[in-house]
Amino acid sequence: MNPQDLKSIMSQGLLSFPLTDFDAQGDFNAKAYAERLEWLAPYGASALFAAGGTGEFFSLTAEEYPEIIQTAVQTCKGKVPIIAGAGGPTRFAIQCAQEAERQGAHGILLLPHYLTEASQEGLIRHVEEVCKSVQFGVIIYNRNVCKLTPDSLAILADRCPNLIGFKDGIGDIELMSSIHLKMGDRFSYLGGLPTAEVFAAAYKALGTPVYSSAVFNFIPKTAMDFYHAVARDDMATQHRLLRDFFMPYLKIRNRQQGYAVSIVKAGAKLVGHDAGPVRAPLTDLKPTEMEELAALIQTLGSQAL
């Protein structure tokens, strides 16, 4: 798959980040991960992000990463494209990107470099070095300490033909509008705020109809129903699901830092697809919060195809 093929995939449909399965000791569980991907693949996501944010990329070791990407690629071959997460320090991000390409992933989502602040010049250098280390497509994730300006993205677009996608995890409407107006169709655009469904209609109005869904991990049918409601401008369905599920869900998610991942693992466990515990420094939901989440999931009915 060349970068433009990946750009086309990124321009339509729902995307999601599968959880990374850990066993009771917190080690990667390849068998359970493959079973998870086999369960999710038929629901119709345009692409899946292996070892992404919801997949706890930030907690993975360099030794685990190749097996995770390999498992995802082999399991989903011929079913759904796999985009690998890559990030952290520039040289580590390059190592991940090259390994993902070697394992047959269709591109990478370049996650933030973490911890240290950087100038726009430094961010440009970071992204450029990663892009030039591989041939497949790269999607940049604007989030936290990686906050590229429209001018910086224009420079990168000129220097890096394989930089084909932009994912927003900041939620700055003025910045997002500026980027979209400046870059036009040079990039495909992806909404990437936590629980992106809450922002989906607003981002569609900004020219970003595609987003990634974390709840697809445990309520895949509902996640797809919501996406189709956004695509059809079906506000009645959107408002019903936002009122009855997503807003109460956010109340649980917002109780602790890091719960954006923890609550997804909790949901998967409740629907019979346990991905194991989260790794430190994240913490799992408390028993009472699990009960609240279970009651919410029950209101949605069957997730069977």
Image: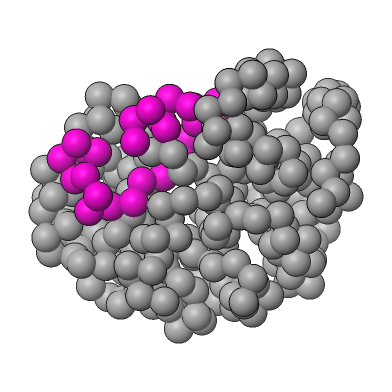
Q: Residue at x 37, y 33 (%)?
A: 170
Q: In the depicted view, which residue is nearer to us: 61 or 81?
A: 81
Identify the magenta region. 179-207
In this image, 252 relative to 192: left or right? right
Q: In the depicted view, which residue is nearer to us: 103 or 235?
A: 235
- Which percent across, then down, holds residue 282? 63, 41
- Taking 216 as reference, is 161 above or below it? below
Q: Residue at x 41, y 31 (%)?
A: 203
Location of residue 145 by image quarter: top left
Location of residue 160 by image quarter: bottom left
- Which percent across, then down, holds residue 71? 65, 75
- Taking 140 as reference, is 197 above or below it? above
Q: Is residue 67 magenta?
A: no
Q: Residue at x 40, y 65 (%)?
A: 6
The answer, for residue 224, to whether it is visible in the render is yes
Which residue is farthest bottom?
102
In this image, 216 relative to 158: left or right? right
